[in-house]
Amino acid sequence: MKIATFKLERWFAKYEFKAPYLLCSSDCESLSVQELLALEPGSEQEFQKLWLGYTESAGSPALRKEISKIYEKTWPNEILVHTGAEEAIFNFMNCALKAGDHLIVQYPCYQSLLEIAQSIGCEVTKWESYEEMGWELDPNFLLKNIKSNTRAIVINCPHNPTGYLMSRGKFEQIMDLAKGRDLLVFSDEVYRGLEYNERDRLPAACDVYENAVSLGVLSKAQGLAGLRVGWVATRNQTIYRAMEGFKDYLTICNSAPSEFLATIAMRHNFQIVERNLEIIRQNLALLEPFFQRWQHVFNWQKPKAGAIAFPSLKLKTDIEEFCVDLVEKQGVLLLPGNYYDYGNKNFRIGFGRKNMPQALEKLEEYLTERIKE
């Protein structure tokens, strides 16, 4: 397989562990092992007795049971645990697609949602959304671009990087369209649960369509990226079995300590996610007036869900140049939109962490000095 460089990850490899102020993190505030174990009395002693042998390839029964509780019609034996979301995406693309297949991908997107398919030899159509249109998706575009060789539709909602959340009606249109043509739907739902208004939350795609595959991970809403635990949920047993088998050539199984801790996290999922939603709400209350003060410098649309947004720069400066200058002078890291292959003006900003106010203060200092120049 020949695959292009994962540009976003290379950007983070260069700056993430050097910059003191991360203002583009896609995850929420994390927990220490001590804090996580404290959620469940007796768990610390259990953890110390944990046997460090191989785990079940599909994921421990206890973890799959807890994950299945966030779904309505999808059961533990329809959950396949992976080492993070990235492995799950790679697994699905290699099992569900072949050279010559056509894929329609919501765009802009996390690079692997289209890059892996292209490396396999698939034809990829970008279902593009635009800032000036509020990042809304046009279902007519989807309808017009389905071909005889279309195999799957890839959606991501709540959306990375814009924070867009489609309506229930639009979601149902997509599902109905896929059902009517027997297409697979790969639904990236890693920010599901972080809707600012719970009534806006969409059903999991795997619960409403038997040929949908829902992607989940503990890295985003729960902020537990260090556990490296993700999963897919699907009622399509052909896809499930193929992915279960292909995983034998990837990680085979997950880390036993990670699965133990992940099981505790999923038992207390509501508590952890609500805590992170409160951090997001507090940070958005600072971002709104910040972008109002600097409206001559930025375009800003408040997202409806998640811990990230995708504003744009009004200055004539290229966005990567702006971001490099910012991190080098002030130690504040933003993610330029060209790392999503999306122009040279947008950038990703993250607001799921407790130290966002300090990072925002440093950004404001930088802007005050720069605008003076």
Image: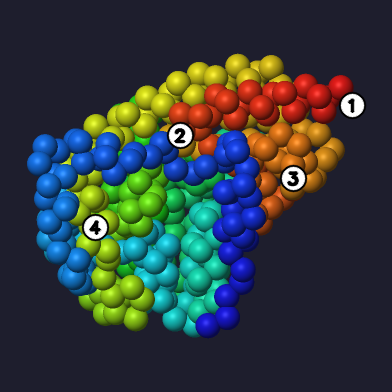
Question: In the rendered structure, which disc, 1 or 4, sits on the residue that comes first in sequence?
Answer: 4
As rendered, which of 271 and 49 lies closer to the eye? 49
Q: Left or right? Give the position of 348 relative to 187.
A: right
Residue lying at 11% horizontally and 50% vertically, measured from the top left: 46
State the SS at label 3: helix
* Nearest to N terminus: mark 2 or mark 4: 4
Residue behind mark 4: 257
Label 4: which secondary element: helix
* Label 1 vs label 4, nearer the camera: 4
Point 37% across, 71% down: residue: 91
Quick one: which residue is furthest to the right in this view?
373
Relative image position of residue 147 (x, y in whole percent): 49, 71
Q: Split into 4 quadrants, where in the image is the C terminus?
A: top right
Q: Which residue is mark 3?
A: 324
Q: Which image quarter: residue 251?
A: bottom left
Residue type, mark 4 in image: Pro
Q: Mark 1 highlights which residue?
A: 373
Separation of residues labelled 3 and 4 (CA atoms): 38 Å
Q: Earlier in the sequence, mark 3 or mark 4?
A: 4
Sequence-earlier tag: 2 or 3: 3
Using the rendered image of the protein, determine whether residue 32 is visible from the camera's viewpoint.
yes
